[in-house]
């Protein structure tokens, strides 16, 4: 009865595994996935259009206001006649605001810096999305490696179950050996189902980053690349100083400084120029026998600007606000620099440690554990050791394989973090830069 329940649990776990693990649809590698992310990631598309909008705002900020053309009549009597009063005239005029104090020029430069900040943030987002895709690629690949390790260990457990069952049926084995092997086989099947679910989740997130539906599997994945990071993190720290987030912070500082200067200039507003020309009709004669009284046309011209009587609570307050924002942006710049240095230092340390651990596990630990398992089987077949020693050796090998896979995954995550912070995607043959359309927009 117990054996039948164990077999049912194993069957259910394997069905879950088959349902969750993505079907291969052609092998893909990491550079191909990263190129898909750069082309189709929706977040990058959003940031790209926001950067384009910022460039257009800069054009608008430096433009003159359009002139206003006026048509009308002046001093018309209620009779509607134009030959009764000498001040009645038809008028055409034009008004134009002229920025003589340079506020709009400074505003244009401030918006240019805002556009530069948005463009830099687009570059930073490219690095970050590619770094996330690298991590998800590694998660998906190593979830498959864990699943295959679990299935291999399940095969070993099945062999142990058959051996224990045969020895127990022959009266030379113990019941607890058989039950322990059956329980371990069920646990490993559950592990395989869990690893497959993790792989399916990573595949879905990776597909979303690449702008593809999560229901469409990307296919079998090649192993992620392994980088040589070196023992000295200084190379990576120097490369991190070129992170676009720092350029965006610098552009924000300049933007607010220019905005403060523009606000002070706006205390003396633009000069408003007005000109008009009035057409006067001949006046009707006062006596029937007299001719019409001819009149000259008239023109008017004026120039004016607002007095900065309340500038302290308006324009100067805005200037102080912009100066405070510039100081805040400088603090953000310093914080970003420290965060980048912390991230690079930690990722470099993880990469060095993980690479060393992977080498030790692969070259020494797993080799010894494989030999120990083979020796345990040989001793068991010769009758000099019991099944428990084989079980312990098999479990130790399984645990070592999972640890080696975890360390390789940690190494891949560290590589992804280093490259995402420094932009060194050229190390795997991927160019992460502006498109030709974006370069033309600049």
Image (cartoon, rainbow, N blue to C red):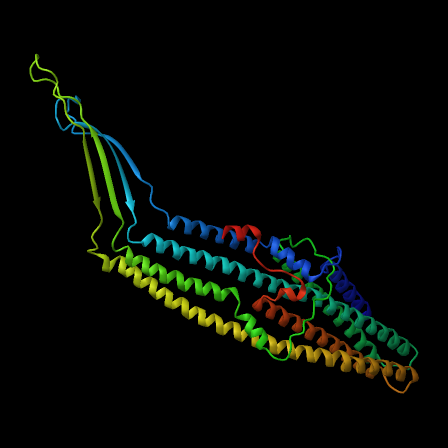
> In the visual, does 366 lie left or right of 380?
left
Task: Indicate whether 237 appears above or below 120.
Answer: below
Q: In which quadrant will I find the N terminus? A: bottom right
Farthest residue to the left: give it.
287
Query: Which residue is located at x 68 percent, y 62 percent?
Result: 30
Q: Position of residue 78 (x, y in %)?
A: 15, 24
Q: Position of residue 263 (x, y in %)?
A: 30, 57
> In the visual, does 250 lie left or right of 46?
left
Query: Which residue is located at x 85 percent, y 76 percent?
Result: 160
Task: Indicate whether 272 appears above or below 246.
Answer: above
The picture quadrant where one finds residue 434 is bottom right
Farthest residue to the bottom: give it.
384
The picture quadrant where one finds residue 10 is bottom right
Say which of 393 and 104 sits in front: 104
Task: Indicate whether 418 appears above or below 284.
Answer: below
Query: Which residue is located at x 27 percent, y 49 percent?
Result: 270
Task: Indicate whether 421 appears above or below 65.
Answer: below
> In the visual, does 403 lie left or right of 283?
right
Q: Position of residue 238 (x, y in %)?
A: 55, 73
> In the visual, does 264 lie left or right of 404?
left
Query: Which residue is located at x 20 percent, y 39 percent?
Result: 301
The picture quadrant where one finds residue 196 is bottom right
- Number of labelled discs? 0
């Amino acid at each position: 009865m117990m054996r039948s329940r164990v077999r049912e649990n194993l069957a259910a776990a394997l069905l879950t595994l088959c349902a969750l693990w993505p079907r291969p649809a052609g092998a893909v590698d990491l550079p191909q996935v990263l190129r898909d992310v750069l082309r189709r990631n929706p977040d990058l598309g959003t940031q790209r259009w926001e950067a384009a909008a910022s460039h257009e705002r800069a054009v608008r900020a430096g433009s003159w206001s359009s002139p206003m053309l006026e048509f009308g009549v002046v001093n018309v009597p209620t009779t509607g006649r134009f030959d009764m009063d000498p001040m009645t005239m038809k008028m055409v005029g034009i008004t134009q605001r002229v920025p003589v104090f340079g506020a709009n020029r400074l505003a244009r430069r401030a918006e240019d810096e805002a556009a530069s900040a948005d463009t830099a943030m687009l570059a930073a987002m490219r690095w970050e999305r590619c770094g996330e895709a690298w991590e998800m690629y590694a998660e998906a690949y190593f979830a498959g490696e864990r699943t295959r390790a679990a299935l291999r260990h399940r095969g070993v457990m099945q062999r142990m179950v058959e051996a224990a069952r045969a020895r127990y049926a022959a009266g030379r084995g113990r019941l607890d050996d058989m039950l322990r092997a059956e329980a371990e086989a069920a646990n490993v099947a559950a592990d395989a189902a869990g690893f497959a679910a993790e792989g399916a989740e990573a595949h879905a997130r990776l597909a979303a980053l690449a702008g593809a539906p999560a229901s469409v599997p990307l296919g079998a994945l090649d192993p992620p690349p392994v980088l040589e990071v070196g023992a000295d993190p200084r190379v990576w720290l120097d490369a991190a100083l070129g992170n676009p987030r720092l350029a965006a912070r610098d552009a924000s500082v300049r933007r607010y400084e220019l905005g403060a200067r523009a606000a002070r200039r706006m205390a003396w507003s633009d000069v408003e120029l007005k000109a008009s020309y009035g057409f006067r009709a001949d006046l009707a004669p006062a006596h029937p026998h007299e001719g019409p009284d001819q009149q000259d046309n008239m023109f008017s011209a004026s120039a004016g600007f607002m007095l900065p009587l309340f500038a302290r609570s308006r324009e100067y307050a805005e200037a102080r606000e912009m100066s405070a924002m510039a100081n805040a942006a400088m603090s953000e710049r310093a914080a970003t620099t420290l965060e980048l240095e912390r991230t690079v230092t930690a990722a470099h340390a993880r990469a060095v440690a993980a690479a060393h651990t992977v080498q030790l596990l692969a070259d020494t630990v797993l080799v010894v554990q494989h030999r120990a398992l083979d020796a345990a089987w040989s001793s068991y077949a010769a009758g000099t050791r019991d099944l428990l020693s084989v079980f312990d050796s098999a479990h130790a090998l399984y645990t070592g394989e999972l640890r080696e896979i975890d360390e390789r995954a940690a190494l891949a995550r560290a590589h992804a973090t280093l490259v995402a912070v420094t932009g060194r995607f050229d190390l795997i043959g991927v160019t992460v830069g502006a498109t030709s359309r974006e370069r033309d927009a600049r």
